[in-house]
Structures are given as structure tokens and as C-alpha cells.
Amino acid sequence: MPTGYTADVADGKITDLRSFAMLCARGMGALIMMRNEPFGAPIPERFEPSDYHAKKMAEAVAERDRLYAMDDAEAEQAAAAEYAEHVEAKERWLSNKRDQRQRYQAMINLVEPWQRAPEGLKEFMLDQLRRGMEFDCPADDSYWLDPELLSGAEWKARRLDAVQKDIVRDAAGQAEEVARTDSRNAWVAQLRAALEQVPA
């Protein structure tokens, strides 16, 4: 049975080494960037690195600059707004978990009195419901820490620290992306040079 790589060989559409090698090259790590493209898409001469990390780093630098420009009153406002947002998010989360727990319990209440269930089914259903309930909405919600109201200065210092870590992480990520892309391009160049030595 032909695979995605050998179907065109089996059908007689590919009869030369160069075409088959270029098709099989898609299975190699150097061409991972083409994983979602159709088999017939040509392999480019050169790949360009993703700019994801560069964009994220630019956003972090802009945020750092915004934080440095923030005066004490603005920092106090931002700290209070973030605290209020976290309090509201916790309440929404707790409300959602209470609702889920009630739905699980309502189904447990329907299953428990069921007398004519086939052997093992009722126990299995109850086990699934109880395990799901404990995983999705445990009775103990103490692991969700209460939000902490910070002073403007504390909030700003923490945000600056986090943003600086983002900048460092994204700079390293971009450098790694460039190095990976350079390696892929070198592999594709090696492939093309090797195929030039193959008789037509």
C-alpha cells in the first residue's frame, strides 16, 4: 500500500530520483515549516525566520517604556484596576465551578436511583461523574489565591520585572528561530547541491 510519499511513484507520476527526493525531503525536520502545505507545493530556495518573537519583544519593549513613563498616580490606578479585574475574574471562576458542580451532582442524583441499569453501567457512570466533578470543580477551591492589592510602586516594579523577563526570553527565542532557519536553509542548499550531481 503506498504512503503519501510513495503514492505518486506507485501511480507512475514520479519516475525520477530528483522528484522523489524532493518529495521525501518534506519528511525531514528541515522542512517542518511546510508541514501544512500540500505535497505538490514547491520547496522554496530559502525560508525566512518567523518574526513572532521579534514582535513579542517589540510589544514588551513598548510596555516597558510605557511603565517607565508612568507617574505614581497612574501606577496606583493601574494597580487598583488590575486588583479589581482579578477579584472579578475569581468570582466568575468560582461561580462557574459552583454551576458545574451542581450539574454534575444533578446527574449523579439521576443515576444513583436507577435500578434497571445493565450490570456495571451504573457504577461506571457514577465513577465517571464523581471523578469528573472532582477534577473539573473540586469542593476545595483554596488553591485559587486571593488577589493581592499592591501599591502603585510595588505593582510597577513587578510589571517591569515581568516585562524585562519577556524581553530577554523573546530575544533568545528570536535568536534561536534565526539559527533554526539558517540550519534549515543550509540543509535545503545541501539537498539541492546533492541533487545537481544526480544524472537527469
Image (spheres, rainbow, N blue to C red):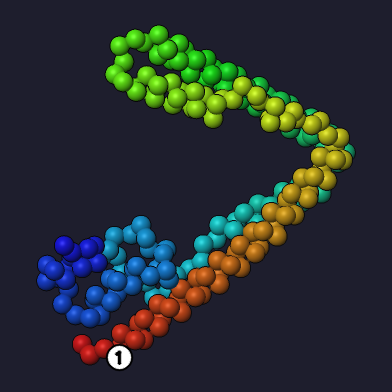
Count of numbered circles in the view:
1
Q: Nearer the viewer, residue 200 or 27?
A: 27
Q: Is residue 37 left or right of residue 160?
A: left
Q: Amino acid at mark 1?
A: Gln
Which quadrant would residue 82 be assigned to in this image?
top right
Quarter of the image holding residue 117? top left
- Percent coordinates x, y for residue 13 in the rendering: 14, 70
Task: From this view, report whether residue 33 is shown above or below residue 126.
Answer: below
Judge whether residue 77 can be spotted in this image.
Answer: no
Can you say which quadrant of the picture contains the N terminus?
Answer: bottom left
Give the residue at x 87% y 40%: 153
| Foreground residue among 100 and 24 | 100
Whether residue 15 is situated above or below residue 6 in the rendered picture = below
Can residue 56 be spotted in the picture?
A: yes
Relative to 19, is 87 on the left or the right?
A: right
Disc 1: which residue: 197
Within 10 Å of disc 1 (Cα), the crowding (few <14, some 14-19, many 20+) is few
